[in-house]
Amino acid sequence: MSINDRILQISKREGLSIAAFARKIQIADQTVRSVCVLQRNKPGYEFLANLVRAFEWLNPTWLLTGDGDMIIESNRGEIDCGKDQNLKQLIDYLRERDDKIEKLIEEKTTWKILYEQILSNKNIIIEKTGS
């Protein structure tokens, strides 16, 4: 079972529509649909962190790896990464991946602005020369 399937299973267990589930975990509806229904994307760090915060009964190890049970038996506060090195490594990896994605988005935006400026300048030159 993929992480996308596990997230969908959480939504079904709670009896929430995708829209209600998205509101509950404070993630955009389209993002949740892309992960759960269409399974086009994998969830990022913010998605997973919000999910773990929203459902205190949720076992984060099960969510991330599929190991163990979906529901934790004892009440927990925050994730204790010191107890589970694999979980800590996975969280670090997700944070690093999200940082890289953010940098790529910023770079793409910069290139898009430059491209649009070049096109605009080219059109001005063509209009002035009449070519």
Image (tube, helix red, strand yellow):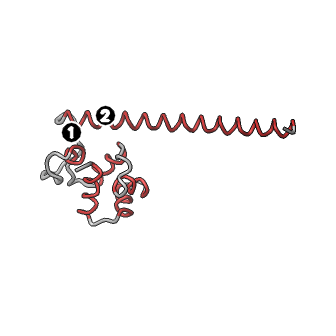
User: Residue at the front extreme?
Assistant: 131
Specify which label sits upstream in the sequence, 1 or 2: 1
Q: Position of residue 114 (x, y in %)?
A: 65, 34
User: What crowding class fits label 2: few (fewer than 14 Cα within 10 Å), some (14-19), or many (20 or more)?
Assistant: few
Identify which residue, 127 or 87, lies in the foreground.
127
119 with respect to 97 (left or right): right
Residue 60 position (above or below residue 32): above
Q: Residue at x 32, y 46 (%)?
A: 49
Question: Neighbour class for label 1 at 10 Å: few (<14), some, many (≥20)?
Answer: few
- Which of 107/60 is in front? 107
Please give the residue where the numbered disc 2 appears in the rendered image.
92
Residue 41: which disc?
Answer: none
Examine the rendering and report whether any part of residue 53 can be seen.
Answer: no
Disc 2 residue type?
Asp
What residue sits 20% from the left and 54% below the top?
57
Q: Residue at x 57, y 38 (%)?
A: 109
User: What is the x, y in percent for residue 113?
Assistant: 64, 38
* x, y percent for residue 107: 54, 34
SS state under label 2: helix
The image position of residue 106, as x and y in percent, is: 53, 36
User: Circle 1 is placed at which residue position?
Assistant: 80
Locate the C terminus by quadrant: top right
Q: Nearer the viewer, mark 1 or mark 2?
A: 2
Mark 1 and mark 2 in contact? Answer it, CB < 8 Å.
Answer: no
Where is 52 relative to 22, above or below? above
**Is residue 50 shown above or below 102?**
below
Q: Is residue 30 above or below residue 88?
A: below
Cα separation, mark 1 vs mark 2, equals: 14 Å
Q: Amino acid at mark 1?
A: Asp
